[in-house]
Image (cartoon, coloured by chain):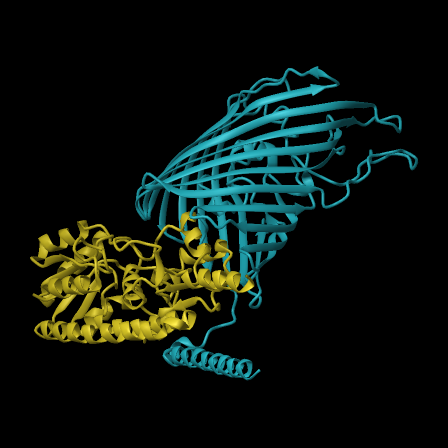
Amino acid sequence: MQKILMISAVTATMLFAQESTQESLAQQLEDKKTKSAKGSSFMPDISLIMDVSYNNISFDEEGHTEHLEIPGFVHGGGGHGHEDHGHTSLAGEDGFNFNYAELVIAASVDNYFDLKGVFHLTEDDFEVEEAFATTRSLPYHLQAKIGKFKSDFGYLNNKHRHNYNFYESPLVYQALLGDHGINEIGAQLQYVVPLPIYLMAGVELLNGENEQSFGTDAFSPHDADEDFVGIDEASRPALWIGYLKSSFDLAGGTVLAGVSMAQGDSRIDHLEDEEGAHAFSGETTLYGADLTYKYYFASDHAITWQSEYIYREMDGTKYIPNDTEDAWANQIALDKEQSGYYSELIYQHDKNWRAGVRYSALSQNDITANSTIQDMPDDMYVTSAMLEYNPSEFSRLRLQYNYNSSLYDEDGDKNNKNEILLQFNYAIGAHGAHAF
Amino acid sequence: MRFLILLVVFMVTLSAKMQVAVTFPYIEQLTKVIAKDKVKVSLLSRGDWDPHFVVPKPSLVSKLRNSDLLILNGASLEIGWVPPLIGSANNPKIQKGGKGHLDLSQYVKLQDIPKSVDRSMGHVHEEGNPHFGVDPHNMIPLAEVIMLALSLHDEKNYTFYKKNFESFKVHWQKKLKTYDRKMQKCRGMKVVQYHELFNYFLKRYGITSIDNLEPIPGIKPNSKHALKLVNEIKEQGIKLILQDVYHEHKTADFIAKNTGAKVVELPHDVGAIRGTGTLDRFFDMLVGRVCN
């Protein structure tokens, strides 16, 4: 008994001593701070990015640009499809383009969360591009995100446009994921695996609205009878995404590789289209693989090779409305297996000069309608070359040339597009550094 | 049996070395001087790189993920690359405000604090000049801060760290005497430098930096500014152009050719130039090349 008491007393004294050493060390460290270091401001980081360009566009067949489409992927090329969306059409806009202004506000909420808002402003629209909270102190090397955010699917999807190496996202992204990529309301959980190399696993659960691949809204012809049985909405959240990303140093450079998967319901409503009105209901799965290799001669002198491949499987029913009767005029069992890729090579000469080339193609376009194989083209591609001059980290001038051989006109003939773009990009304010 | 298991667990915990990530080589050296082999130190950059523009490679994330302590220079020197790394390391310990986030700039009296900042002034740091690691007189105070931070995380080795700090202090005070004596004869000298990289060193030894090869911080030299420098150097009889390792050397060579001033390449950190692998050798070279 006495022994136990003694041991307890000794332990208690030791613990107490430890506590006081801890405190005294912390105090000593605190006392060494210089006065100027103690204050800090509560102002969040605010930045504004502005992007304008001068676009010179010409077509092989200038008379056939009204109904351009990427067959099997994107239609409604004359710009009549999505008036409410304010996006430029496949034909593009000649002359000066005000591409966007982006307002970013970010700060720590408290010890537990960071908050970031990214607001995308076009001439007439104010869009919440992203607004999300990220955890700062989850245990077990986990990090969670909630809100509206760009998914970490693939390599390019989570990047903002001012961080692109080219004026626009590559053809495969535009064809499969649309202008904004997978940008959704939902939640994300990521885990950094305890290994000597970087390995991160992440899952996301999202509502699932994407102009090209996913959707949940119910649809029926707009002038349908009350008793018309349309297509019910899918229960939300309807989109699951998972990915693994790894990075390691190899031969003096850095490799970044990832595999991603996305699976969700598809409700794609083009019933309001003036021509070829239709809608689609089904399921879509995307598989992505990306590989980046960066080699640095110096911190501002580097060469980067970056490639990404995306495969899409869409399975469902295509509905054609009928103008006279309140029933679907036609229902077609539709199955799409499509894929595309891009590969780009960027050479950074110094802080000011960068140049690059990119090739992006849609290489697989297998569509069966009611078990009949459709005759679809699979030779769509865009070749781009760019030269950048960055007067500072905050301003950029970019000259880009695109040869776009992905567009078909209403007669089913290719109508190649030549684009010369002069892009001006400026950033002011405090803008957090970009990830690799 | 239970006791045995507890013992094993205890031993494992004891033998698990504390892991420290540091942003620059001079911090690595100071940490190793204090910690010897008691901690595992991971360096996130290299001495011959531009300290502002280290590439935030994901391979660095794995080093931060497992670190108990991150020691950085601070004063926004790493703002372009450390925040994204911390953001993806999922390690609450090293987050800003966390117990394992040690910002050395908070323990240094910063110089060149601008009265107002605007981007038209170039890449200025509102906190002041962050390149305080080139002043040998900052090494003892910084070593003490690192000693305290290491002890705070690894209290059982406090006496060991303290002892190492004390012997470093004795050694470094001797070095400082030598440096101060050697630099005495260069007091009042005028120089130009590429970027405001050596201000703390120059001010310490009464050397005036008249102008920079960069017209404003972070912006490349232009011919107009170079010609202005040529005139300045001639008028004021400046003998030395201080060149760092990571900027282009052409401008300095051009100015030297047109003025007769001498270009000296200076290390800005440990390992910047061959033969500067330790703190002693780094400062030996810095002192020797500026004032000989």
Horizontal and vertical percent position of residue B228: 18, 59
Left or right, residue B255 beside residue A25: left
Quarter-wise, where is residue A422 in the image?
top left
Q: In which quarter of the image is the N terminus of chain A?
A: bottom right
Name the residue rendered at 84%, 34% in the picture.
Answer: A230
Report the number of discs.
0
Viewer-side residue, A259 vs A306:
A259
Question: In cyan, which chain?
Answer: A
In the depicted structure, whether residue A223 falls above or below residue A191 = above
Say left or right for A333 vs B89.
right
Q: Residue furthest right?
A: A227
Residue B45 in the image: state x and y as whole percent.
33, 54
Residue B107 versus residue B28 in the image, above or below: below
Question: Looking at the rendering, which quadrant does residue B178 occupy?
Answer: bottom left
Q: Where does the image place residue B78, in percent across and percent down from the top left?
A: 37, 60
* Place of residue B97 in the rendered image (x, y in percent of width and height, measured from the top left): 48, 69
Q: Is residue B116 visible?
A: no
Q: Which chain is yellow?
A: B
> Which residue occupies the foreground of this view, A96 or B115?
B115
Horizontal arrangement in the rendering, residue B20 relative to residue A282 (left or right): left
Tell me which residue sits at (68%, 39%) in the image: A83
Asked whether B54 or B196 is in front, the reply is B54
Residue B193 visible, this orientation: yes
